[in-house]
Image (tube, rainbow, N blue to C red):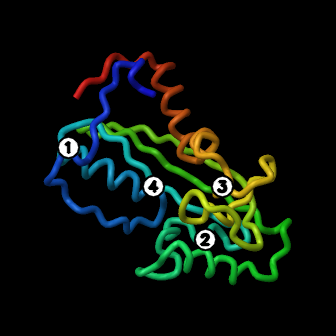
Amino acid sequence: MFEDMGVILLSLSEFPDLPEIEEDGETFFDNAYKKAKTISNATGKMVLADDSGLEVNYLGGLPGVRSSRYSGDDATDERNIKMLLDQLKNVPSEQRDASFRCILIMYRPDGWFKTFEGYLHGKISQEPVGESGFGYDPVFYIPEKGLTVAQLPLATKNRVSHRAMAVKKLKKWLQKENIPEIKS
């Protein structure tokens, strides 16, 4: 995706001695910023980091920043889904609006950063449907598609997901700013 802009992407696996980062922020921004800054400081490189999760309107934005640990520190996807569906048990479909949300941060070693945000809007279904994906995908229903995220072909998911929306904004910004070739 970024090759045509002269960007070289490196994996974290190319940096074997990176510090562990506890995602203990109050917001998606807090966690993404902490990850980006910590890794940039450790590597001296520009870093892209994200944090994301599910926000359910009826639950005041929960599970939110604790999406992966919603049912406890030893949470599994299945237990998280069960807890979510239990909390929405008698809630009608029209009140089950939800969004997957992603905050993506580009961070430079000099402290400059830029934030990009992506959403995928939908509803929480009454029960899990579909075999693909992970996390809350089997209960995240997209009315326009008539499917849960777990039923979407991978190529479609990768085109419409909250992360894809954040990356599209990043790419558009890079092109608009005519960012010169970035090399590491």
Q: Earlier in the sequence, mark 3 or mark 1?
A: 1
Q: Earlier in the sequence, mark 2 or mark 4?
A: 4
Q: Quadrant of residue 99?
A: bottom right
On screen, residue 121 above or below 129? above
Question: Which residue does the image show at 46% across and 66% down from the upper left?
Answer: 26
Q: CA distance from mark 2 to mark 3?
A: 19 Å
Name the element at disc 2.
loop
- Please give the residue where the numbered disc 2 appears in the rendered image: 62
- Give the label on residue 14, or none: 1
Which mark is nearer the camera, 4 or 3? 3
Cα–Cα span, label 1 and label 4: 21 Å
- Residue at x 54% of width, y 65% of height: 135
Pinpoint residue 134: horizontal percent, then vertical percent.
Answer: 54, 62
Image spot of residue 66 (x, y percent)? 49, 70
Residue at figure coordinates x 71%, y 58% from the top left: 148
- Compared to residue 64, the image places residue 85 above or below, namely below
Left or right: 32 in relation to 129:
left
Tell me the kind of residue under disc 4: Asp
Please, what is the three-letter code of the amino acid marked with disc 1? Glu
Residue at the (69%, 83%) spot, across then down: 86
- The reply to whether callout 2 and callout 4 are in contact (CB within 8 Å) is no
Q: Dot 4 corresponds to which residue?
A: 51
Q: Amino acid at mark 2?
A: Leu
Q: Quadrant of residue 178?
A: top left
- Kind of residue at badge 3: Val
Q: Return the x and y of residue 27 as percentages of the image width and height.
A: 48, 61
Left or right of 24? Residue 147 is right
The kind of secondary structure element at disc 1 is helix
Q: In the rendered structure, which disc, 4 or 3, sits on the residue that comes first in sequence?
A: 4
Q: Quadrant of the N terminus?
A: top left
- Count neighbours of disc 1 (C-alpha within 10 A) and say few if under 14, some if 14 to 19, many if 20 or more: few
